[in-house]
Image (cartoon, grey):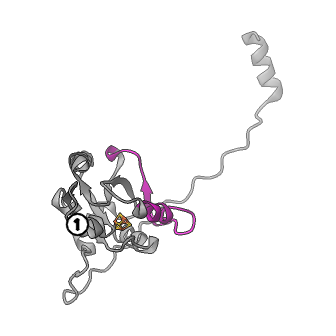
């Protein structure tokens, strides 16, 4: 079709797309969670809200690293981000690269082959960042303590900010930990 014919066609037909809807109103971020009282220090590996980076309030992008899991925790992490528990509605989203992430979610014991990849993944995640150890294996090696291929729990390789216990933990627990980061 020649340019002249195209121009005539455009003039004859006119605009056929629906006009754009008005832009949504600006989103107001929720107020930060109140700090836990000093008489109730975390006893289960949870960081206080005031100890988590305030920059991550509202939204956190999560890179998941399986450092040597039996795959039980992965099923629960999948459920936490699935349509039933839907962690995304609280501002947590899984991403494919640590370069795009604010948080690293570690499952499983850290095996010899995964110690260096885990260390590098956390190092590649921009600051401020949060590291979550999810499941008994990631917290203290759980069933696999003293295994010949085991280096240790996640905290033996990287700094851990939040721990979620359970073998495997319930999706609600995983969502609750993520909500402590987003404050939603
Ligand atoms: S905590 Fe339990 S479910 Fe999770 S990786 Fe360890 S053994 Fe598997």
Q: Which residue: 34% across, 58% down?
A: 69
Q: Which residue: 45% across, 65% down?
A: 76
The residue carrying mark 1 is 145
Residue 40's x, y, as percent?
Answer: 23, 87
Residue 52, can we see it?
no
Q: Is residue 111 above or below residue 164?
A: above
In the rendered structure, the answer to whether residue 179 lies left or right of residue 89 reads: left
Q: Is mark 1 within 8 Å of ligand 1?
A: no
Q: Residue furthest top?
A: 2
Q: Nearer the viewer, residue 56 or 101?
A: 101
The answer to which quarter of the image holds residue 133 is bottom left
Ligand 1: quadrant of the figure: bottom left
Q: Is residue 100 above or below residue 177?
A: above
Quadrant where the N terminus is found in the figure: top right
Segment tinted magenta in the rendering: 74-99
The answer to which quarter of the image holds residue 53 is bottom left
In the rendered structure, the answer to whether residue 135 lies left or right of residue 110 reads: right
Q: Residue furthest bottom?
A: 39
Q: Is residue 81 magenta?
A: yes
Q: Which residue: 36% across, 46% down?
A: 100
Q: Nearer the viewer, residue 90 or 76?
A: 76
Residue 41's x, y, as percent?
Answer: 20, 83
Q: Nearer the viewer, residue 97 or 35?
A: 97
Q: Is residue 154 above or below residue 2?
A: below
Quadrant where the C terminus is found in the figure: bottom left
């Amino acid at each position: 079709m020649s340019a002249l014919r195209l121009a005539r066609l455009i003039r004859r037909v006119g605009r056929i797309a629906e006009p754009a809807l008005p832009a949504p109103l600006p989103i107001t971020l929720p107020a930060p969670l109140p700090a836990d009282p000093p008489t109730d220090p975390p006893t289960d590996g949870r960081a206080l809200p005031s100890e988590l980076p305030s920059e991550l309030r509202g939204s956190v992008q999560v890179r998941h690293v399986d450092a040597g899991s039996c795959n039980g925790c992965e099923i629960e992490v999948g459920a936490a981000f699935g349509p039933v528990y839907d962690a995304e509605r609280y501002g947590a989203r899984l991403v494919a690269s640590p370069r795009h992430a604010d948080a690293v979610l570690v499952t499983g014991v850290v095996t010899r082959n995964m110690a260096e990849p885990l260390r590098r993944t956390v190092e590649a995640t921009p600051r401020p960042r949060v590291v979550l150890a999810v499941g008994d294996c990631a917290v203290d090696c759980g069933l696999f303590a003293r295994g010949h291929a085991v280096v240790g729990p996640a905290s033996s390789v990287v700094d851990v900010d939040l721990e979620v216990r359970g073998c495997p933990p319930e999706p609600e627990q995983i969502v609750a930990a993520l909500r402590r980061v987003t404050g939603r």
